[in-house]
Image: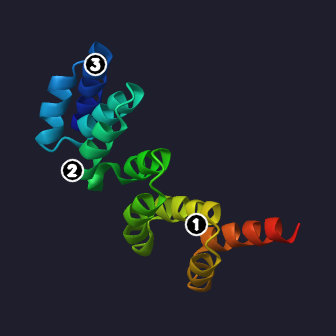
Amino acid sequence: MRHRRTAWQLVGLLRERGDLDELRRRADAGDSAAARQLAEMLRERGDLDGAVAVLRRRADAGYLQLAELLRERGDLDGALAVLRPRADARDSAAARQLAELLRERGDLDELRRRADAGDSYAAEQLAELLRKQSS
């Protein structure tokens, strides 16, 4: 636990210094905290493609961030593709974000399938979508 906190402090300091090179080196070596910080710095600088590339290489560490960046870039299909396997594996954060994207997209069929399979987030978003359609 202490090691993880120290690693987070280090990448936080690197980000504060704006040290993209060291963050990139650490991310390439498998440091998931560095990958997330690097992606966030790139996003803040307007380099969405660079941020997406960093997170695609480390999708296991930053899949929610990757999905959000893809969504921000207008690639809903890409965001959904990142989230589906995680949601199917019962990752609640992924299931929540997936259901929200499906509602935004108006995908009644997939929301129904997921709700019927017991996904409470899908059921909630399906109800919201049906409520909006009936108004």
- Nearer to us of marks 1 and 3 is 1
Residue, disc 1: 102
Left or right for 110, reference 13: right
**Secondary structure under the numbered disc 1 in the rendered image:** helix
Asked where in the image residue 6 lies, by quadrant, the reply is top left
Q: Position of residue 8 (x, y in %)?
A: 29, 31
Q: Amino acid at mark 3?
A: Leu
Left or right for 77, reference 34: right
- Mark 2 or mark 1, which is nearer the start of the sequence? 2
**Secondary structure under the numbered disc 2 in the rendered image:** helix
- Mark 3 or mark 2, which is nearer the start of the sequence? 3
Can the viewer see residue 25 in this picture?
yes
- Looking at the figure, which quarter contains the C terminus? bottom right
**Secondary structure under the numbered disc 3 in the rendered image:** helix
- Mark 3 or mark 1, which is nearer the start of the sequence? 3
CA gap, disc 1 to disc 3?
37 Å
CA gap, disc 1 to disc 2?
25 Å
Q: Position of residue 113 (x, y in %)?
A: 57, 84
Q: Position of residue 70 (x, y in %)?
A: 42, 50
Q: Residues within 10 Å of mark 1 (few under 14, many from 20)?
A: many
Q: Which mark is residue 57?
A: 2
Q: Amino acid at mark 1?
A: Leu
Q: Which mark is residue 13?
A: 3
